[in-house]
Amino acid sequence: MPTVVDRGLEGVVVGTTQLSNVEGAIGRLSYRGYDIDDLAPNATFEEIVHLLLYGTLPNRHQLEMLKRELGSCRALPEPLLAAMQNVPKTAWPMEVLRTIVSGLGLFSPVNAQGEHVSDVHTALELIAKVPTVVAAWDRIRRGLEPVAPRSDLSQAGNFLYMRTGKVPHAVEEDALDTYFVLLADHSYNASTFAARVAASTRADMYASVTAAMATLQGDLHGGAATAAFRTLTEVKTPENAEPYVREILERGKRIMGMGHREYKVRDPRAKHLETMAKELAEHVGGSDRRYQTAHAIEQASRKVLQEKKPGNAIYANVDFYTAPVLADLGIPGDEFTCLFACGRIAGWTGHILEQLADNRLIRPQATYEGPTAGPYVSIEQRSSNGQRG
Ligand code: ACO
């Protein structure tokens, strides 16, 4: 029987999880049995962290304990802050984040065997510190001193505070908090799978999260929101949306922030982000042109894609309305992938713990398509292109 090659592992089930369920056909996402439609308007990111790491929504006492632990480990080791001061100011924020997160392992205690402990406290430490790295680099590259984290603010509130030095307006804090809730987990997406592959080799949590960060950065995954923001900036007004979409598709390119491997209907997170984009536009004041333009691009993409490929329904994914939301929070477009990481770190660490609790090395196979086996060819006998003479 010929071997079936599943390029991109599409539809291949490689493991189990209790953390989140993506029901692509009906557009439902749930975390441990709670629908994202219930969680987004009601739960805070801290509650989601507890849900993903400990398995249940926290009671008041548990939530207080978790907030205290997050608040107490937000500060970065001084040598890492000093290292960031020496990074070229042109460095892409995601590269800085990936590098500094990898560096965090250097400052973490080791056990008697010389290994880092990968437990729920390491997970909380990483969840606490990732936003600090993002905010510190945001300021350093603008020539400003980093603002020290505060332990009394929420993850979202503290992030915005560290960027500006001002406690944010509740509307802004709530918007970012909901964004983190929506982004916290998404089953075996590419970056989470990378984290699980690394963890399955018994690499520690710092290394596994670094693998996840590296995998997140491409624009088919976490980089798409930045690309969607570029589109928004280029299109500028709703009237330009359809001509733009037609031109992009004529050139055989993709509309960033549209389409999803799992969702055959609209990504359930998109509607929450769209609502937030509208609300933030009102809060920020002035014009809601950015939101209107995003909306027009989505409509035009659906229309033109439907014309070109009838039956191939492509809808907005989570990254699409992320662009106007984060832009209205004052976050620069090239930092969007880092913000994604600030939310997804909850899921990554939860999946790493789940992988370690019942580990099996993840090691798939490939069909070999190279030359058939032959004897070694000495250098004298090779042709000019290195082949057998
Ligand atoms: N714009 C235009 N056409 C698209 C798009 C798009 N955004 N997405 C898919 N298509 C088309 C493809 O051209 C292809 O057409 P074809 O069958 O005629 O060749 C068809 O739809 C299927 O596309 P695939 O790439 O095979 O589908 P896949 O499941 O791999 O796509 C992906 C998923 C990679 C996300 C894709 O939709 C895409 O490139 N989107 C843009 C990038 C993006 O927004 N990524 C973020 C995803 S969400 C996240 O990671 C958080």
Image: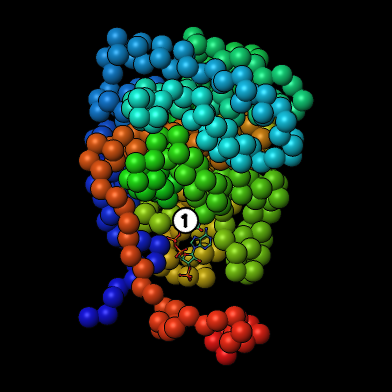
Residue 254 occupies which quadrant of the picture?
bottom right
Residue 278 occupies which quadrant of the picture?
top right
Q: Quadrant of the N terminus?
A: bottom left
Q: In the displayed structure, does residue 60 sit left or right of residue 190?
A: left
> Secondary structure under badge 1?
loop
**Above/below status of 19 relative to 309:** above
* Residue pictured at 31% horizontal, 34% vertical: 353
Residue 382 visible here: yes
Q: In the image shown, does 314 or 97 lie closer to the viewer?
A: 97
* Residue pictured at 35% horizontal, 25% vertical: 112
**Residue beneath disc 1:** 259
Residue 267 visible here: no
* Residue pictured at 66% horizontal, 65% vertical: 247
Is the CB of mark 1 within 8 Å of ligand 1? yes
Residue 22 in the image: state x and y as whole percent.
31, 46
Pointer 1: residues within 10 angstroms few (<14), some, or many (20+)?
A: many
